[in-house]
Amino acid sequence: MVASPSTARQTTDLTLAPARQRVFSGMQPSGNMHLGNYLGAIRNWVRQQDQYENVFCIVDLHVLSQPIAPRTLRQNTIGLASVMLAAGIDPGRSVLFVQSDVREHAELSWMLNAVTQFGELNRMTQFKDKSAGKKDEAVSAVLFSYPVLQAADIILYDTDLVPVGEDQKQHIELARDIAERFNARYGETFVVPKPDIKAEGARIMALDDPSKKMSKSDARPNAAIALEDDIDTIRRKIKRAVTDSGGEVRLAPDKPAVSNLITIYGLLSGDSVAEIEARYAGRGYGDFKADLAEVVVGAIGPIQARLADLHANPEHVRAILADGADRARAIAAAKMGVVRERMGLGAG
Ligand code: ATP
Ligand code: LTN
């Protein structure tokens, strides 16, 4: 749905009161963007661009929760921006910027730590998963306080909706609790955001193990299809993807592997599950997988072509990010002025 011309804002100047609901989302520049990131997040951001006022953030401060070489982080940041632009994020309709270029994110995070409870952070499943089995010395405090920074990212922009994959639901709920608690303690300051999690594609599973989500930080070589994988690699990974017993192409709870492949096929081709099931009835997994590989290549190919142009022109990407940071900073700075006043910070 596109907003009617009378209400549509022709500008992305964020200091003006939004005529449309505001969307904010973020992605970590931790390398190897995969089909799960695309189907669960980026693709929805692109499709909804006309409907909302959009702010998209490359959250480099979040990546510091794991060890990473400075050069790699910088490269990943420009690489992720290029992928987002190649996938269809349009700087004319969306603000695209790097988190650490707008200092207010880190600043607000500190203040929100004051209204966040230790127990809340200790219950976050992402923290539990990522710290599991590691010695205390190997788990940074950043990994623990990570969801507070995420809450700051979101509520700094008076965000209404946060389009994310299923794994982020708990973090968005915490952001809501933090915003509500701040408002109750210091007076109405923040819009309380809602998650926007789609019924399909919000949890794409690993190709080699349908009990695990497709993930960037997975070392297993055949778990994820990277958006930058070449055609032969995509075909090979899909050929090797695990399937379920029975040989039938059918979406069902007892067929998690094939159901995941059908979901990917359906989202990228636009075909319904019923159409896909009917097409492959009695034909087995071989034909289905061969066609799925072509569907994936057909969807990712045009993105990769645009990406090659952007890789050849990193200065163009940097200029878009600098402009995005200026526009984001304008609203973030205004909001921080209010926060400092409400909390009694500074000399006044
Ligand atoms: P990691 O697994 O290393 O934590 P990630 O793959 O989850 O990384 P993020 O940058 O943390 O990547 O996530 C970016 C966006 O992609 C988030 O909105 C997240 O919910 C979504 N996302 C990540 N993995 C999947 C997946 N398997 N299916 C659907 N959406 C996903
Ligand atoms: N934690 C998120 C990335 C993220 C984010 C955000 C997502 C950081 N800040 C704000 C939405 C809104 C993740 O995907 N792992």
Image (tube, rainbow, N blue to C red):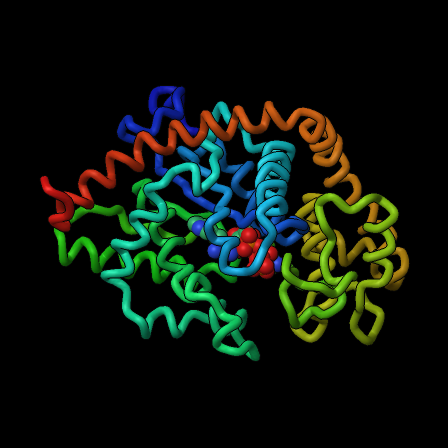
Q: Is residue 49 above or below residue 147?
A: above
Q: What residue is shown at x 76% (from left), y 67% (from top)? A: 208
Left or right relative to 146: residue 266: right
Q: What residue is shown at x 55% (from left), y 33% (from top)? A: 89
Left or right relative to 231: residue 139: left
Instruction: Give x and y (percent) for residue 284.
Output: 88, 63
Instruction: Give x and y (percent) for residue 331.
Output: 30, 33
Q: What residue is shown at x 59% (from left), y 54% (from top)? A: 68
Q: Is residue 104 visible?
A: yes
Quarter assignment of residue 314: top right
Q: How many marks?
A: 0
Q: What residue is shown at x 67% (from left), y 50% (from top)? A: 32
Q: Quadrant of ligand 1?
A: bottom right
Left or right relative to 242: residue 264: left
Q: Is residue 200 visible?
A: no
Instruction: Give x and y (percent) for residue 119.
Output: 32, 74
Q: Is residue 99 above or below residue 262?
A: above
Quadrant holding the C terminus: top left
279 vs 188, nearest the viewer: 188
Q: Is residue 53 above or below residue 211?
A: above
